[in-house]
Image: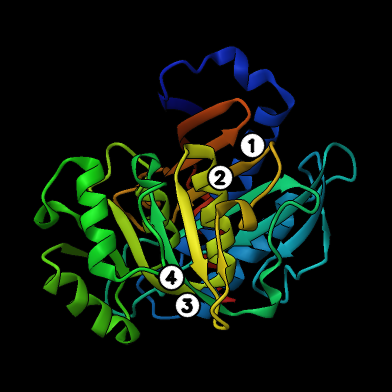
């Protein structure tokens, strides 16, 4: 059972009936299953098993989605780049997948992990196979034209503060909590801005910069290239932007990472963040929260789903096996 929790102003129920919206809502079933599968491993300290469970769940369901998709980035041997996915009819498209991104701690439920799928016309998604990571700068619609990843951090933070009509000391910067970002964190704080550390993954932080209810103003730092493509798709749907600097110094913008006009992004929380609640287990049911975004027409929906607890028992059975 699914109930719509929130719509952006101007969206309508009739829009869901379009072929693009139908595809987006088919994809959210896939990310829900992946998040539940990964969620069964949260707190157990076995990140690889969590991602394997998520990708197997995706494989089981994505074949029923009405599309002729080709995986641009899947991140695991279970879903490899160049693989055909979907039912074999419907739109021809590129598919980017991140399954349970972010580390799952052995001692606590690390936030900011989600399962996500981005879809665009064939040839529209950047192929990140030649690079493992990229330096990223993500902002919302109000700051798209005022930042440049090639500028000093302090200069970009001042530009964000001016665009938002706030003080630099009120600017909140999302950064992956990794040793490689120690100097970046010091640089942000020396500039007078606030640091919001992301424990799990940076897709949630990148998407959050364009959400009006999120406290995050900008995302900075290095992260996975595949996750950058997925996040760029979401930001395209919400009017934000993502700039990426590759190891060779080349700078890519949102339109380099995601082209085309028909773009869809679906994400389901594995563990909670300012973007989405994580998988929640109650007596007899498991509850997920997902974000469904499309570029044409521009819509953003939050979807809450409930499933019988049998789903969880199935995952526990696989874990014991």
Of residues 39 and 318, which is closer to you in this image? Answer: 39
Circle number at residue 24? 1
| Distance in Å between CA atoms under marks 3 and 4 | 8 Å
Residue highlighted by disc 3: 47
Tell me which residue sits at (62%, 58%) in the image. Answer: 257
Which badge, 3 or 4, comes first in the chain's sequence?
Answer: 3
Of residues 202 and 162, which is closer to you in this image? Answer: 162
Residue highlighted by disc 2: 266
At label 1, counting other C-alpha atoms closer than 10 Å, the crowd grade (few under 14, some 14-19, many 20 or more) is many
Tell me which residue sits at (82%, 66%) in the image. Answer: 82
Mark 3 or mark 4, which is nearer to you?
4
Mark 1 or mark 3, which is nearer to you?
1
Of residues 281 and 227, which is closer to you in this image? Answer: 227
On the question of residue 65 being in view, the answer is yes
Which badge, 1 or 3, comes first in the chain's sequence?
Answer: 1
Q: Which secondary structure, mark 2?
A: strand
Assign the C terminus to one quadrant of the image. bottom right
Which badge, 2 or 4, comes first in the chain's sequence?
Answer: 4
Circle number at residue 136? none
At label 4, counting other C-alpha atoms closer than 10 Å, the crowd grade (few under 14, some 14-19, many 20 or more) is many
Residue highlighted by disc 4: 102
| Distance in Å between CA atoms under marks 2 and 4 | 17 Å
| Distance in Å between CA atoms under marks 1 and 2 | 7 Å
Q: Is residue 60 left or right of residue 231?
A: right
Q: Pointers 2 and 4 in contact (CB under 8 A)?
A: no
On the question of residue 33 being in view, the answer is no
Tell me which residue sits at (73%, 56%) in the image. Answer: 60
| Distance in Å between CA atoms under marks 2 and 3 | 22 Å
Q: Which secondary structure, mark 4?
A: loop
Q: Which secondary structure, mark 1?
A: helix
| Distance in Å between CA atoms under marks 1 and 3 | 27 Å
Is residue 228 placed above or below 26 in the rendered structure?
Answer: below
């Amino acid at each position: 059972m699914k109930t719509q929790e929130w719509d952006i102003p101007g969206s309508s129920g009739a829009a869901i009936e379009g072929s693009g919206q139908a595809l987006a809502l088919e994809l959210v079933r896939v990310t829900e299953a992946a998040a539940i599968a990964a969620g069964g491993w949260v707190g157990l300290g076995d990140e690889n098993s969590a991602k394997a469970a998520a990708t197997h769940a995706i494989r089981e369901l994505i074949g029923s989605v009405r599309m002729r998709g080709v995986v641009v980035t899947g991140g695991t041997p279970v879903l490899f780049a160049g693989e055909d996915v979907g039912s074999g009819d419907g739109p021809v498209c590129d598919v980017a997948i991140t399954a349970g991104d972010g580390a799952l701690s052995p001692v606590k439920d690390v936030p900011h992990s989600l399962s996500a799928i981005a879809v665009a016309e064939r040839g529209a998604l950047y192929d990140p196979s030649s690079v493992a990571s990229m330096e990223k700068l993500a902002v919302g619609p109000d700051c798209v034209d005022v930042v440049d990843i090639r500028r000093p951090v302090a200069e970009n933070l001042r530009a964000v503060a001016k665009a938002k009509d706030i003080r630099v000391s009120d600017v909140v910067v999302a950064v992956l909590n990794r040793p490689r970002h120690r100097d970046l964190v010091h640089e942000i704080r020396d500039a007078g801005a606030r640091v919001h550390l992301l424990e799990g993954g940076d897709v949630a932080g990148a998407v959050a910069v364009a959400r009006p209810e999120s406290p995050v103003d900008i995302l900075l730092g290095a992260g996975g290239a595949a996750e950058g493509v997925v996040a760029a798709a979401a930001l395209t749907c919400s009017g934000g932007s993502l700039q990426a600097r590759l190891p060779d110094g080349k700078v890519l913008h949102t339109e380099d990472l995601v082209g085309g006009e028909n773009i869809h992004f679906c994400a389901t929380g594995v563990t909670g963040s300012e973007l989405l609640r994580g998988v929640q287990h109650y007596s007899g049911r498991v509850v997920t929260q997902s974000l469904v975004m499309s570029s044409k027409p521009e819509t953003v929906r939050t979807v809450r789903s409930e499933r019988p607890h049998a789903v969880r028992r199935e995952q526990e059975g696989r874990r014991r096996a």
